[in-house]
Image (cartoon, rainbow, N blue to C red):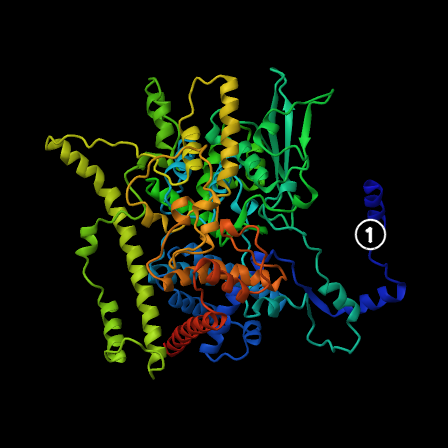
Amino acid sequence: MRFTDQGAQRRIANQPKPFSAEEHADLRKQLRNVNFIKPRFADETEINIAVVCRKWKRYCKEQNLGEWQTALENVTRETMMSFFLRVSEWSKGKIKSWGTTQVYIRQFQQLYNTVTGRSMDRNDAKELYKFHHTILIPRFGYRAPNINGKPVLGADNLQAILTFNIAYDTGIFPSERQRPQLAGCYQLLYYTGARPAEIVHAERKTPKDGCTDEIFKLKGVKSINHECGKDNDSLLDRLLLQETAGRGRPKALCYEDILMMIVRHPVTGRAVPAMAVKFIHHKGADNKPRPTVFFFTPARKLIFCAVSTIIALALHDQAFDAASLTDATQILRAEVRGPVQSTALRWKQSMLKVPIFRKLSGGALAVGEAMSYSKLRDDMGRQSLDAGFEKAWTPRFARRGAANAANGNASDAVRDQMIRHDPKFARFQGAYLNENVEFDLQNTFLEEETEEQMYKVFAHVSLTRDPRATRDMVPKEVWENLSPDPEILELEQRRQNLKGGQYRVQGDENEAEIRRLTEEIRSKRDQRDKNVVKEYREYYFYNRPTWDIERQENGEEEEEYAEPETNLQIPERTRLAHILCHQPVDCSHDKLMELWIEAIDLMVTLCNKRETVRRDRIRTHPQPKQPIEEESPQAKSFPLLLDPNQCPVCVGDERLPLEERTFKYCRPAVRNDHFDNQHLVERERAIQRGDLIRCNHPQCQHDPNFPTLDAFRRHVHDSHGVSLRTSDQVMQRRSKKFKRRLMAKGMEAQAEGQS
């Protein structure tokens, strides 16, 4: 019945009604008055054009050029040169490369073409680029693009980052599911050379100032002599303003893009899990779709296995359509029966358009929101620095590594297909080819044995890695001897004079200025600390080789480096790190299958765990290792009457370790801040949806749920002895924070306007 229903739905699909002869005649008359139909740009391009438009509006207002559209239609060569000089003055210290300003010029040309309906004069554009190269670049000291090199990653780098992610990373995520998600992203980026936008959500939000709608609300530019009638252009406007049907899914890798299957090996006859991943959101996919399908088989080392990671995430999401596929054993021991070569593992219909790598907010896993590109980029950069690499990684490092791995091992046509390049542009040689020559020309010329293994090390970023280095490695004595910043001192002195020796500033006539100064001081301190951390890392990596040579000359003994111990709070993560990082080399098939099953099940369990910042207070010394098989704490081990400094929600959160569930804050006010920031919003949203609130205490699992927040607060106070803030107190606290933010932002905007 379902098949026949689908066929009927396809037959009765809405089709556009054909125009009559009279309507075609009216359309031709209307099209006669249209000089230019605006091109359909990608969403990112429209946002970029809107950003340049915002700068142009600011320039027109500052230089008294009148209405921005009129000024753009009548723009002259000297005005464009002055505009980009002013843009460079606004962005002084922010723009580093002249590639950025050159992109601004191209986007301004797109803005001119879109608004006026004609191309910019070729001679004017040529003179503008000459002005850019001869005046702007030397005046502002812009460097050439990619002058700092194009780092390329290799297999040893992937192993280092995967090992650090699971075994040594002390970063705290809203949920430990982020670790398998990061591992899956790293593996797919390395093995496919995909851009991050093909895997996670990388679309920017449309500017809220309405600039995008102002530019693109009309799809056509009509002639100047055209007189608009009341109903004259209704037909044409309907055609121009119609929207393209939406995708109906996030622009990221979803379950429907992955085919998981069990395949019969053509040689051994064993049933082997495999998967096919189709990437459809490549660059330019809206105009020229070029889907690319990659096939994956199990890796010999479990830490490299992308199939295992996707299976673990799917099991955690309960995404398999077959009800029996609930653990790794059922999947890895499945057989291929009958005359077929493979058996597909189908997904549930409700999961097809759900992203694989999803967003985590407040410890909860979003249903339809994909992980953002900024989250992937920030976590990748932080983990690479903490793992001892000299430079923070970006996803492009992995893309270059994949492209160079395919170069020479695959034909140029296949290489360009995998990287999603058009062969006629030869983009690989210009942008992705490793600048480190991977060939021993010296020994080849001398007809000696080549050093192939050495040149593999030379070609990748692991050449300068120092596992002793971390992201923030500034010694304590450097911070203590750091001279105070005179600009920060001046701001603090101004704030102190305004405060007049008073601690509380609420209601003071200078409250807004004091809060603005406080925000500015905080921002400058943060920026200074970041600069100190960055400069010390550069100082360390530059001078460390010299220090080692001097120690050798002085006869000092070599510092013994011992691999750090795996000191983790979550026992499942400890066991998983041991399996992945210390897999035996000579492992039989049956033993490998056992480890494989255990690793996937541990990843699924790890997805339900989480840590908080309280971990750092609890872990004052290495904790004894806890066996995985230990039973979870019984409900009776948590007393019904809690300490007033304990969180009533965290006590019942089984994702947390025991030490964090029983953690006591220093005073009730701090515990209330934690509850309001971490748990209250989730319960307020549940009330808005019409859901009931449940008490998480282990001894209250069977108690009735609560329809209001006040009822929940009374229960927590009467049953558990913990007093939470009332609704009025919460609103008062939020109102104060909101007013303080408005004061700081308002005064900042006023200061910028005066400058």
Q: Nearer the viewer, residue 262 or 76?
A: 262
Q: Nearer the viewer, residue 345 or 134?
A: 345
Residue type at mark 1: give it.
Answer: Ala
Residue that appears at 53% across and 35% down: 309
Residue 15 is left or right of residue 96, and the answer is right
Where is the C terminus found, in terms of image quarters?
bottom left
Q: Position of residue 182 (x, y in %)?
A: 48, 42
Q: Please say if 650 is above or below 445.
A: below
Q: Position of residue 409 (x, y in %)?
A: 51, 27
Q: Nearer the viewer, residue 347 or 244?
A: 347
Q: Please say if 244 is above or below 63.
A: above
Question: For the residue carrying disc 1, how many other residues have a C-alpha within 10 Å: few (<14), some (14-19), or many (20+)?
Answer: few
Q: Position of residue 683 (x, y in %)?
A: 54, 60
Q: Position of residue 693 (x, y in %)?
A: 57, 58
Residue that appears at 48% across and 45% down: 635
Where is the N terminus found, in terms of image quarters?
top right
Residue denoted by label 1: 13
Q: Is residue 645 visible?
A: yes
- Quarter of the rendering containing residue 113: bottom right
Q: Determine the secondary structure under disc 1.
A: loop
Residue that appears at 11% across and 30% down: 555
Q: Residue furthest top?
A: 268
Q: Nearer the viewer, residue 193 or 352?
A: 352
Q: Residue furthest right?
A: 21
Q: Please say if 217 is above or below 41.
A: below
